[in-house]
C-alpha cells in the first residue's frame, strides 16, 4: 500500500489532509513546525487554561503521534527572526525549503510517496530518489503569475491602497524563490485545489486540467446558533485589511450605496493597510474592531444580515463557510471558492472582482432583500451542512485514488 509524507507548517486546513491520510492508512509521516505532542500536553496539565487551549489547537487526536515529526530547530529560527524584526514573508521564503528537504529525506528513507503543500514542495519534487515516488501537490493559493497580474492591475486603478502588493511580498523575491513558486506544479503527478478558481489559475499557467482535482474545504458546524434575524441591515467583514481581500472596494461601494439609514458595516481586522485606513476614515456607518475573540466573531456571524468579502484573489475563503454555518448569507467574488459552494438559493451572492459598481448594486439589493427574508438564513445554514470536514476527507481520499 502506498504511503505519503505530508508537509506543511502551522495548522493548515485544521490538519484535515494528514488526518484523512492517517484514517485511510496512507500516512507515513507528517512533517510540521510546532505540534502539541502527548508529552507536552502531560506537562501542561496544570498550566493555565489558555496554554492548554493553545496546545489543543496545535494537535489533531486522529493523527498518531508517532507519525508526526516537528522541525523544532527551524521553528526556533523562525521565531528568532520574527523577534529580530525580519519580515515574516521573507522568513517563510527562506525557511520553507528546509521542510521540503526533510520530506525528500524521509521519502527516500522509507520509499514513500509525497503529498506536499505548494510552499514546501519544490526541493522534494526535484530531488533524486532510489525509487519513483508519486508526487501529489496541494496548490492552496492561486498561481503567483495570476496573483501578481490581478494585484498589479488593481494597484494601477487604486493607487495608494496596494501595500500588500509592494515591497516584502513581491519586490524582494529572488529568482530561485520565484521559480519554486511559479513552477512547483510542473513535476507533480496530481494536483489538489480547494476551488475551481485556483485550478483555473494553474490551467492558465499551462497545466493540463486533467491533472487537477477540486475538493472544496469543509467546516466543523457550530452546535448552537442564536435565533437572530436582524431587523436592520448589518454587514460584516472579517479578514486582513489589505488589498487582496478587496476591502477598499467594499468601502468605496459602501460610500456610494443608497442604503437604509440604520445600515451598519462592521470590520474585524487585526491589521489594516494605511491607504485603506484613510479610506475607512471617510466612510460613514462603519465600525472597526482591531481584535475580537472567536466567540465574538461567531456572535457577529449570527447577528449580521450579510457577510461580505469582495476578494481580488483567494484560494478558497474559509470565512465564507464560517458565516454560512451560522446562517449568515454571504457576498463575495468569483475569485474565491464561492462558485463551488452554491448559488443564491443557498444564500450565496457573487459579483465580479474589482467591480465597485456591481458591488454597490448588490449591497443595495441585499439591504432590501435579506432583512425581509429571514428564511434565507436557513438556506445558508443548510449549504454549510453539505460541506463538513468529514465530506472533505472522504472526497479527498476518493480523488487521490482516481
Image (spheres, rainbow, N blue to C red):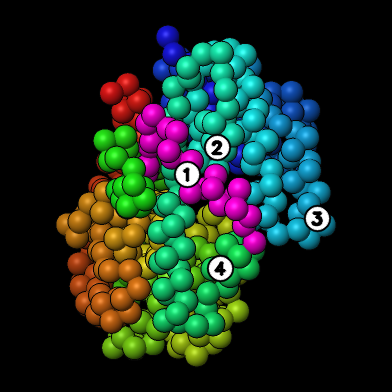
Give the residue at the far left of this rendering: 345
Residue position for label 2: 122
SS for dot 4 = helix
On the question of residue 330 being in view, the answer is no
Which residue corresponds to mark 1? 183
Which residue was labeled with disc 3?
A: 83
Q: CA distance from mark 4 to mark 1?
A: 23 Å
Up-down relation of residue 65 to residue 368 (above or below): above
Of 175 and 292, the residue lying toward us: 175
Q: Disc 2 vs disc 4: which is toward the camera?
A: 2
**Name of the residue lying farthest toward the top:** 1
Query: Could you say whether the residue bearing mark 3 is in a helix, strand or loop?
Result: helix
Q: Nearer the viewer, residue 321 or 68?
A: 68
Q: State the residue in front, 172 or 219.
A: 172
Please state the horizontal and vertical placement of residue 174, each as a whole percent of the image. 63, 55
Alpha carbon distance from label 4 to label 3: 21 Å
Look at the image and give the residue range highlighted in magenta: 172-194
Number of disc labels: 4
Task: Classify mark 1: helix, strand or loop.
Answer: helix
Q: Where 12 falls versus 66 (above or below)?
A: below
> Disc 2 to disc 4, how far (Cα)?
24 Å
Which comes sooner in the sequence, label 3 or label 2?
3
Amino acid at each position: 500500500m502506498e504511503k505519503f509524507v505530508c508537509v506543511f507548517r502551522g495548522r493548515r486546513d485544521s490538519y484535515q489532509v494528514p488526518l484523512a491520510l492517517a484514517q485511510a492508512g496512507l500516512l507515513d509521516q507528517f512533517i510540521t513546525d510546532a505540534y502539541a505532542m502527548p508529552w507536552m500536553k502531560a506537562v501542561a496539565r496544570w498550566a493555565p487554561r489558555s496554554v492548554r487551549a493553545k496546545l489543543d489547537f496545535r494537535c489533531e487526536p486522529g493523527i498518531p503521534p508517532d507519525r508526526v515529526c516537528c522541525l523544532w530547530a527551524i521553528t526556533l529560527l523562525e521565531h528568532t527572526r520574527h523577534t529580530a524584526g525580519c519580515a515574516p514573508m521573507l522568513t517563510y521564503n527562506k525557511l520553507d525549503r528546509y521542510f521540503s528537504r526533510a520530506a525528500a529525506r524521509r521519502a527516500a528513507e522509507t520509499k514513500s510517496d509525497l503529498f506536499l503543500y505548494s510552499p514546501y514542495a519544490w526541493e522534494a519534487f526535484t530531488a533524486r530518489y532510489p525509487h519513483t515516488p508519486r508526487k501529489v501537490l496541494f496548490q492552496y493559493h492561486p498561481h503567483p503569475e495570476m496573483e501578481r497580474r490581478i494585484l498589479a492591475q488593481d494597484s494601477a486603478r487604486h493607487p495608494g491602497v496596494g501595500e500588500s502588493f509592494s515591497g516584502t511580498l513581491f519586490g524582494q523575491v529572488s529568482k530561485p524563490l520565484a521559480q519554486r513558486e511559479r513552477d512547483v506544479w510542473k513535476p507533480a503527478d496530481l494536483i489538489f485545489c480547494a476551488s475551481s478558481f485556483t485550478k483555473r489559475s494553474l490551467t492558465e499557467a499551462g497545466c493540463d486540467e486533467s491533472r487537477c482535482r477540486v475538493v472544496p474545504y469543509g467546516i466543523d458546524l457550530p452546535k448552537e446558533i442564536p435565533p437572530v434575524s436582524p431587523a436592520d441591515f448589518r454587514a460584516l467583514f472579517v479578514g486582513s485589511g489589505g488589498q487582496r481581500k478587496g476591502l477598499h472596494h467594499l468601502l468605496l461601494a459602501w460610500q456610494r450605496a443608497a442604503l437604509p439609514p440604520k445600515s451598519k458595516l462592521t470590520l474585524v481586522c487585526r491589521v489594516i493597510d494605511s491607504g485603506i485606513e484613510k479610506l475607512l476614515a471617510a466612510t460613514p456607518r462603519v465600525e472597526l474592531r482591531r481584535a475580537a475573540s472567536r466567540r465574538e466573531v461567531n456572535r457577529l456571524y449570527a447577528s449580521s444580515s450579510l457577510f461580505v468579502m469582495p476578494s481580488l484573489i483567494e484560494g478558497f475563503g474559509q470565512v465564507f463557510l464560517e458565516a454560512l454555518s451560522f446562517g449568515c448569507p454571504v457576498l463575495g467574488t468569483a475569485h474565491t471558492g464561492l462558485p463551488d459552494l452554491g448559488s443564491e438559493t443557498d444564500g450565496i451572492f457573487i459579483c465580479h472582482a474589482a467591480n465597485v459598481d456591481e458591488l454597490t448594486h448588490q449591497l443595495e439589493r441585499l439591504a432590501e432583500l435579506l432583512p425581509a427574508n429571514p428564511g434565507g438564513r436557513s438556506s445558508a445554514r443548510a449549504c454549510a451542512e453539505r460541506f463538513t470536514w468529514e465530506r472533505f476527507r472522504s472526497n479527498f481520499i476518493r480523488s487521490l485514488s482516481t
